[in-house]
Image (cartoon, rainbow, N blue to C red):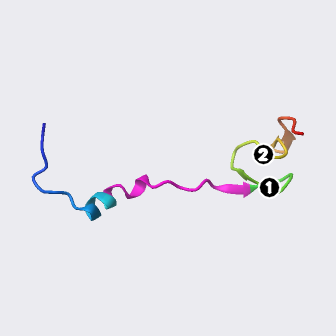
Amino acid sequence: MGLPKVKLSKSRKGRRRSHLALLLPKLEPCPQCKRPRMSHSICPNCGHYKGREVIKTA
């Protein structure tokens, strides 16, 4: 198994891992109730998706 010849600095290691950062979910307002919801998903508040009711909510 190969071993590194030179120690990898923290900055070089961080630059390599820069794309591994966690991102916040992209939210958009629901067309029916205007509450924030994730794109391409059923609204947890009103149960609508693409202009029609998919699940019944209380």
Q: Check if residue 20 falls in the magenta segment.
A: yes
Residue kind at label 1, given as amino acid type = Arg
Name the residue beneath numbered marker 2. 43
Q: Tell me, yes or no, whether the two marked residues, 2 and 1, touch with CB atoms within 8 Å.
A: yes
Q: Which residues are magenta?
A: 16-28
* Residue at far left of view: 5
Name the residue rendered at 68%, 55% in the picture: 27
In-front residue for pair 9/55: 9
Disc 2 secondary structure class: loop
Instruction: Count numbered badges in the picture.
Output: 2
* Residue at far right of view: 58
Is residue 42 shown above or below 24?
Answer: above
Disc 2 from disc 1: Cα separation: 8 Å
Quarter assignment of residue 7: bottom left
Give the left or right position of residue 49, taking residue 39 as reference.
Answer: right
Residue kind at label 2, given as amino acid type = Cys
Query: Tag 1 or tag 2, which sits nearer the N-term?
Result: 1
Q: Quadrant of the C terminus?
A: top right
**Residue count near mark 1 (Cα–Cα under 10 Å), binned few <14, some 14–19, many ≥20:** some
Name the residue rendered at 12%, 45% in the picture: 3
Give the left or right position of residue 48, taking residue 6 as reference.
Answer: right
Give the left or right position of residue 19, taking residue 43 as reference.
Answer: left
